[in-house]
Every structure is written in structure tokens, then in C-alpha cells.
Amino acid sequence: MVGRDHLGSAAVPSRLRPTAPIAADAILVGDPGRALLLAQELLEQPKMSNHARGLWGYSGRTPAGNELTLQATGMGGPSAAIVLADLAELGVRRAIRIGTCAAIAPDLRSGETVVVEEAIAGGGSAGSFGVAPGAAVAPDPGLRDGLRRELGESAREAKVASFDAMTPGPEEGIAGAEAADMQTVAVLARARALEIAAAAVLIVAERGPGGEHLSAEELEQPIVAAGKAAASILSP
């Protein structure tokens, strides 16, 4: 593991300012509050490893004794890609994104858990990650299959389209997409460039524009369940 100069020999990245060692395995969430929630659920004695720029991060040991980092990435693909690059500089080698998405497929239910089969670029900043509009990025097969195995019948595999902004009708022109989010393409594409194994699991938080939207409290249980599955794979 590496961290700040007084924690290891690696240089300090431009955005993150770690105050505790960063693990080689990380769970990424957009919301800082979810980073705290999962740190409390998954780590025995979590230590705040970053608070710079409001990007809360926590590191510690799982009950199995393995090191794990929980890191907030902020909102949107560009922010997630920047944070992932800093984590790579700090020694992260595997990462699982846990986030939310909007349903496109009519049979996707609010609160349902989705293991991302592939992420389809909805244009915008995806091009800067080397992914043309309509092109897809696949997760690491080992991490994807592990998530599917750990979550079992409580989750389904699906294709997800990623957009810079969740505007009305994001599914238009994205063939095969069953859900939409704002980060997964960026995370998977940037991870590939950084030689980080990455995958994603998402919770359906809303059903289209103006539809049902789950509250933070309603999302807690499926987020924690996804976090436990991710931790089991990353830190067996």
C-alpha cells in the first residue's frame, strides 16, 4: 500500500490528500455519505483516508482481516475518472463501483440490483475516455462474475447507458440499454486505461422522468447488500 510521503514513497496525487494508507482494493461510490455508510458496515475500525474536496474516503480492515478502501468519487463521469486516476497512483489495482441508476427496461423494478454486463457511451465526455457514442465497455469478467455469484437471485445482469446529464428520455438512441447512469462508462474505460480491474453494481433508484424515486433511506439496504458482496470478492 502507498499513501502520502510520510506514509509511503509514492508522490501525492493532485486531488486526493490521503491521511491513511490506501488499499489495493477499493469500492467507489459517488455520494460521500454512502462512503461513510459502507465504511461503517464493512470495516472494523475505519479511518478517514481522504476529506479533500469533499471526496470522503475511508480505509481499514474487513472482518476477514483484509485491507479495503471506500472512496467517494463525486457526481458524474469526469469526476469519477479523475478520482480513479489518483487512486491508481496510490496503488489501487481493483475497484468496484456501487451506485444508482434509472430504469429504462419496463420490467426493471425500483430497488432492484443490477450487475453491469456492459456500459454503453451516451456521448459527451465518454469520447475523452476513448469510447465513441454507442460503443460499449465491458467490466472485468472475474469481478463481474463474482458479483453475480455473491448477489445470486437478488440481482440481474443488464446493459447500462452512461450520460453526462440525466435528462428526460436518456434512452433515446441507445440500443439495448436497460438502465441509465452518469458514471459507469467513465469508471470502466478509465480503469482499462490504468490497468485496473473494475466492475459495477447499481441500484435502480428511479423509473424514468417524473417516475418513482427512492429516498436515501430506501436505498440504504440494497446499497449495503451490494457493498457486502463487493467486499466479499475484493477481500475474501
Image (tube, grey):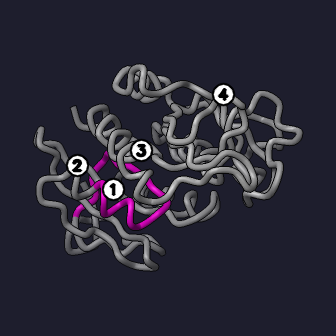
Q: Is residue 192 above or below residue 166?
A: above
Which amino acid type is shown beneath numbered disc 2? Leu
Residue that badge 2 annotates:
42
In which quadrant will I find the N terminus? Answer: bottom left
Kindly tell me whether residue 186 is visible in this rendering: no
What residue appears at the point 47 percent right and 74 percent down from the top-left corner?
A: 15
Q: Which mark is residue 70?
A: 1
Label 4 sits on residue: 107
Q: CA distance from mark 2 to mark 3?
A: 15 Å
Residue position for label 3: 95
Determine whether label 4 and label 2 are within 8 Å by CB.
Answer: no
Q: Earlier in the sequence, mark 4 or mark 2?
A: 2
Label 3 secondary element: strand
Q: Give the residue drawn at x 31%, y 47%.
A: 24
**Mark 3 against mark 4, which lies toward the viewer?**
4
Tell me the kind of residue under disc 3.
Answer: Ala
Residue 13: give x, y in percent of width and height. Answer: 43, 70
Q: Residue at x 66, y 27 (%)?
A: 107
Circles 2, 1 touching at the beta carbon (< 8 Å) = yes
Horizontal relation, residue 12 to residue 212: left or right: left
Label 4: element kind: loop
Q: Residues within 10 Å of mark 2 (few under 14, many from 20)?
A: many
N-terminal of the two: label 2 or label 3? 2
Q: In front: mark 2 or mark 3? A: 2
